[in-house]
Amino acid sequence: MFCNDDQPMFNIGVIAELLKVHPETLRIWEKHGLVEPSRRNKQRLYSNNDVKRLQFIHFLINEKGLNIAGVLQIISMYPCWSTKHCAGGNQSKDEKVNINKPCWKEQGTYCYVIEDKADQCSACPHYNRDCVQ
């Protein structure tokens, strides 16, 4: 069976119960741009990747003690935050990973080391729209 991690499937009640937070907390996080659930008939629907983002937000707030402004600052350093087909991190010691930057998508993994943002402009579609040509 094929599973699309970006397919909206879960309503706000299911996600709130899963994360053990009030649904209003999820609405506040959405209001601040931390996550953008899909909508169907005015109902919020979250995908598996949205759940992973929310779990990472929950971790930053509850385990690391950050407020919403701090979370916004942290996720701004993740160019893959809103990328649909982010491959996730790596935990291999042989790969160049940044042990100070846990991957939001896969718990226990880390983001790859970025050599230089300029090197990525030509290769990354996310940066292409941000880079001055």
Image (cartoon, helix red, strand yellow):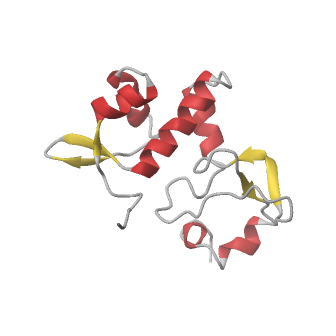
Residue 33 to residue 124: above or below = above
Residue 94 in picture, x, y percent from top left: 86, 65
Q: Which residue is at the far front? A: 1
Find residue 15 and report its image quarter.
Answer: top left
**Residue at image point 57% right, 38% down:** 56
Q: Relative to the observer, which residue lies in front, 5 or 127?
A: 5
Q: Residue at x 58, y 65 (%)?
A: 130
Residue closest to the far right: 94
Q: Is residue 19 above or below residue 121?
A: above
**Residue 115 position by quadrant:** bottom right
Q: Is residue 69 left or right of residue 20?
A: right
Residue 32, relative to residue 90: is it above or below? above
For the N terminus, which image quadrant?
bottom left
Q: In the displayed structure, does residue 18 sit left or right of residue 118?
A: left
Residue 25 in the image: state x and y as whole percent. 40, 24
Q: Residue drawn at (62%, 69%), measured in percent from left and top?
A: 131
Q: Quadrant of the C terminus?
A: bottom right
Left or right relative to 119: residue 70 = left
> What is the tally of numbered marks visible in this picture?
0
From the top left corner, tell me how far across and down residue 33 is, in percent: 44, 40
Residue shown at 48% from the left, 38% from the top? 54
Residue 105 in picture, x, y percent from top left: 57, 50
Viewer-nearest residue: 101 or 93: 93
Q: Is residue 94 left or right of residue 110?
A: right
